[in-house]
Amino acid sequence: MSEILVLVDHVDGAVRKTTNELLTIARRLGEPSAVFIGSDVSAAADQLKAYGAEKVYVVDDAEVKGYLVAPKAEVLQQLVEKTSPAAVLISSNAEGKEIAGRLAVKTDSGLITDAVDVQPGDSGPVTTQSVFAGNYTVQAKVTKGTPIITVKPNAATPEQVEGAAEQEKVDVTISDAAKSAKIVASEPRKATGRPELTEAAIVVSGGRGTGGNFEPVEKFADSLGAAVGASRAAVDSGWYPHSFQVGQTGKTVSPQLYVAAGISGAIQHRAGMQTSKTIVAINKDEEAPLFELVDFGVVGDLHAVLPAATDEVNKRKG
Amino acid sequence: MNIVVCVKYVPDATADRHFEADNTVDRVGVDGLLSELDEYAVEQALQLKEKGDGTDEITVLTVGPEQASDAIRKALQMGADKGVHVVDDAIAGSDSLATSLVLAEAIKKIDHDFVVCGMASTDGAMSVVPAMLAERLGVPQVTFGSQIEMQGKEIRIRRDGDAATEVIGATAPFVLSVTDQSGEARYPSFKGIMAAKKKPVETWSLADLGVEAEKVGLSASWTQVEDTAARPPRSQGEIVTDEDGSGATALAGFLASKKFI
Ligand SMILES: Cc1cc2nc3c(=O)[nH]c(=O)nc-3n(C[C@H](O)[C@H](O)[C@H](O)COP(=O)(O)OP(=O)(O)OC[C@H]3O[C@@H](n4cnc5c(N)ncnc54)[C@H](O)[C@@H]3O)c2cc1C
Ligand SMILES: Nc1ncnc2c1ncn2[C@@H]1O[C@H](COP(=O)(O)O)[C@@H](O)[C@H]1O
């Protein structure tokens, strides 16, 4: 069976949940081989094994770290040439998509980004994507070269299948050209103690209607074990960091439950949450466009409804 | 320093965007405009030019159908100096690899020191063309800049990544892409609108670029869309009006019925 290369998405060896999903998808298509770029593979090895990696290619990141995107694309190019995989799977975030784009040019291969599902087909993997702000579903495949596919969080339910996870150290050479965009400084994101926005099963977002007070939103989120999101209006007002923005120029989320409080529902916001399973809105304006999408809506003041709902939830949880 | 800004003509997001029978995006039957996210690229180019010595020239470049000249005109009205429109029937249906190939060949023909792009197109939203251009042109990529600073040929951007906020540095030539956090884009002034009428716009075909027609377009693209389907509209669920806490009780009841509690 052909190998499927999966680029491991991790921070200092802490592997993101999306990698488990990619390994699960890879198993449908062939034999999963994880590509670990970093110096701390021991922290990641058990998890990669548990989710089915047959091989783990380990690339020491001394040459890679410190530069933006390009060296990682060179690593993958060299592994594609070495292993002739049937596909390469990468997490669909800003960096992942850029790595994929450069790899596609280097290997003269087709690229599909933002897949929400990947299934085996007669002539290679068939992907599903959600486009035009979630209004259309598209099925596509790669017709040239090695299919390079970036996959969104929650595209598959991770399955635990023990793999051999045989480690192989790979030496790669990184060109000077790939080291031309330097990471001059880096400030790690502070942990919030809440689930990662794009991976969370429940997301509670606040908008301009919070008036800058996110406490009711955060408390309600915590009662449900949810991640917190924000509209661009809230981010632009400086009420919440940009990394929590949901929408066209923020994160796309597709949780089991999305709760929008004090958010009107502009097309750019919908683009980031429209494919959520269940949608709930709290808004004092019954004409708010977001109500068109909801499974359940409360017309009311979020500053009254959210704290009371938080108490109700905590009571019911007992 | 001379700047090329890549701008895309896209179907209006508030209009009824849809696909053609061959599964390509209908770019002609739907009102289009300069991608809002590329206005930020034009804006940053203008700001960089304004800090320069006054000799700089900004060229806006687009690859797209006849109507895409609207996108160039808007950028010229904002203050760019000239336009290049690559238009050729053979380009229709190109994917990101084919589009970036055409863009890269056009950029090579324009006297420039660096390239500015938007963070994503508002239709395809792939966010890959800038990285592909950097790869094809063999220059550094400084992408997703939310703050941009330039001194001489040195650029520094702030990039808000998933795991960290980074400062990225490079030396021109490079490909820069900017986010919608980089600063509001200006509106064309009346003077700008009048001045744009006299600004030169060149139209290039694939032959002008020396790109073979077989290398681009729908049939030559590296990917194929097999099927498109409109998502069934969501039907509106129950809406309650809060009175003295009734909304919260009803909400908790709904969440419990769906097993979220
Ligand atoms: C290129 C571009 C990209 C964009 N990208 C994004 C994006 O990624 N994400 C995004 O969110 N937006 C994005 N936008 C902005 C988008 O168009 C809207 O402006 C934005 O989503 C509005 O945010 P909002 O709903 O919080 O604010 P508003 O539209 O002002 O809505 C606030 C809502 O709160 C309600 N409200 C007020 N007070 C209360 C209260 N006490 N209790 C309950 N309800 C209350 C009001 O009735 C209103 O419906 C983008 C725009 C552009 C042009
Ligand atoms: N057809 C095009 N013509 C000019 N510029 C483009 C075109 N397509 C993409 N770009 C540029 O590449 C950026 C990212 O596009 P994309 O990768 O399609 O999301 C856009 O913001 C533009 O700056």
Image (cartoon, coloured by chain):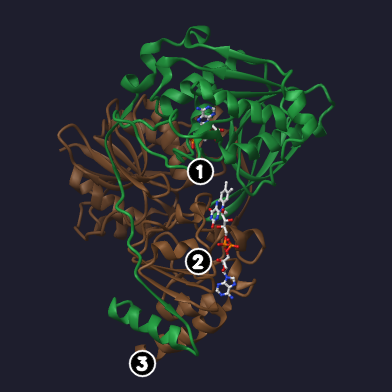
Chain colours: A brown, B green
- Label 2, ligand 1: CB separation under 8 Å: no
- The three-letter amino acid code for the residue at tag 1 is Ala
Closer-to-camera residue (A206/B191):
B191
Q: Nearer the viewer, mark 2 or mark 3?
A: 2
Q: Which residue position is annotated with label 1? A: A62
**Label 2: element kind:** loop
Q: CA distance from mark 1 to mark 2?
A: 56 Å
Task: Classify 10 Å Cα crowding around label 1: few (below 14), some (14-19), many (20 and above).
Answer: few
Closer-to-camera residue (A29/A173):
A29
Which quadrant of the figure contains the N terminus of chain B?
A: top right
Q: Chain of mark 3?
A: A
**Label 1: element kind:** helix
Q: Nearer the viewer, mark 1 or mark 2?
A: 2
Measured from the top left, where is residue B58 in percent x and y? 71, 24
The image shows residue B30, relative to residue B243, as above or below, that is above
Q: Which residue position is annotated with label 3? A: A318
Q: Residue at x 42, y 19 (%)?
A: B91
Measured from the top left, where is residue B163 in percent x and y? 52, 56
N-term mark: 2 or 3: 2
Q: Are marks 3 and 1 in contact (CB under 8 Å)?
A: no
The circle drawn on residue A124 is none
| Callouts 3 and 1 on one subunit | yes
Q: CA distance from mark 2 to mark 3?
A: 36 Å
Measured from the top left, where is residue A274 in percent x and y? 40, 57
The image shows residue B98, relative to residue A134, as above or below, that is above
- Residue A201: name its quadrant: bottom left
- Residue farthest to the right? B53
The image shows residue A122, relative to residue A155, as above or below, that is above
Q: Nearer the viewer, mark 3 or mark 1?
A: 3
- The three-letter amino acid code for the residue at tag 3 is Gly
Task: Classify 10 Å Cα crowding around label 3: few (below 14), some (14-19), many (20 and above).
Answer: few
Q: Chain of mark 1?
A: A
